[in-house]
Amino acid sequence: MKHLQVGHNTVTTAWSPPASGPRHSTHGCRRCVALAREFIVLNLFFFFSIGDEQHIQYLREALLEAAKCTPTPTAFCVGCVLVARYPANATQQPHVLAKGYSRELPGNTHAEANALTKARQLSPEHLSEMFPTSAENDKPTIDDVLKHTDVYTTLEPCSVRTSGLAPCADTLIAANVPRCFIGVGEPDDFVQCEGAQRLKAAGCQVIWLKGLEEECLTAARRGRQE
Ligand SMILES: [Zn+2]
């Protein structure tokens, strides 16, 4: 087995060097080098393809959340899914920690903030069930888990709230989430959004997912163009 470090991820391949037999000199024969290169490229291709598919799947889940919003002429309909990869290692299966949508909770609330509020409402028992650890005194807190939780949101997190409430970008930064996957940028229908820029400046990795931009935008403006 061989482990390749790709960003924060480790790719495990079935390739291993021959234990015995004739050894090539350190410069390697051209054919072996070409084969090894081809093998690595293929593995990376599959790794990223599978990864992308999974990200799109979570964004689709966020779109299902957006569909639950009660439309209003003065705000967008947004869906958000929080996916925990805790502890951060390649073998840990991702867990959907919480989901949220615009105006789901009382008080003109937004999808990302609602998902975070719901994640914080999870009981310690629920968290321990989701992320079992062998050590009794090493139970994860929600703050620990959020540090390893990716955000999937149909629309760029807001940076300005005309209502005076905290913008979602600031709420996500305060939660220390490492990555934010976004379906589409916020159009300037209401305000000029600088959410992605603000997240990046705070050290949160922003990833613009490709392929569902139209769906995300249509979902966002639902109830306003009809
Ligand atoms: Zn917001």
Image (cartoon, rainbow, N blue to C red):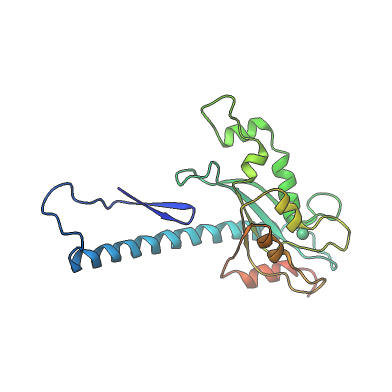
In the current view of this chain or complex, which residue is farthest to the front? 26
Q: Quadrant of residue 182?
A: bottom right
Left or right of residue 37, residue 110 in this image: right
Q: Residue at x 58, y 66 (%)?
A: 209
In the current view of this chain or complex, which residue is farthest to the left? 22
Rendered-image quarter of ligand 1:
bottom right
Q: Residue at x 83, y 64 (%)?
A: 72
Identify the image quadrant of the C terminus. bottom right
Residue 150 higher or lower than 216, as above or below: above
Q: Residue at x 17, y 65 (%)?
A: 29
In the current view of this chain or complex, which residue is farthest to the right? 163
Left or right of residue 98, residue 136 in this image: left
Number of marks present in the image shown:
0
Residue 180 higher or lower than 1, as above or below: below
Q: Is residue 103 visible?
A: yes
Residue toward you, 222 or 173: 173
| Image coordinates for residue 3, horizontal then vertical, percent | 36, 50
Left or right of residue 101, residue 211 in this image: left
Q: Residue at x 65, y 35 (%)?
A: 141
| Image coordinates for residue 157, horizontal then vertical, percent | 72, 61
| Image coordinates for residue 99, horizontal then vertical, percent | 67, 50
Q: Quadrant of residue 186?
A: bottom right
| Image coordinates for residue 88, horizontal then vertical, percent | 52, 45
Q: Is residue 101 visible?
A: no
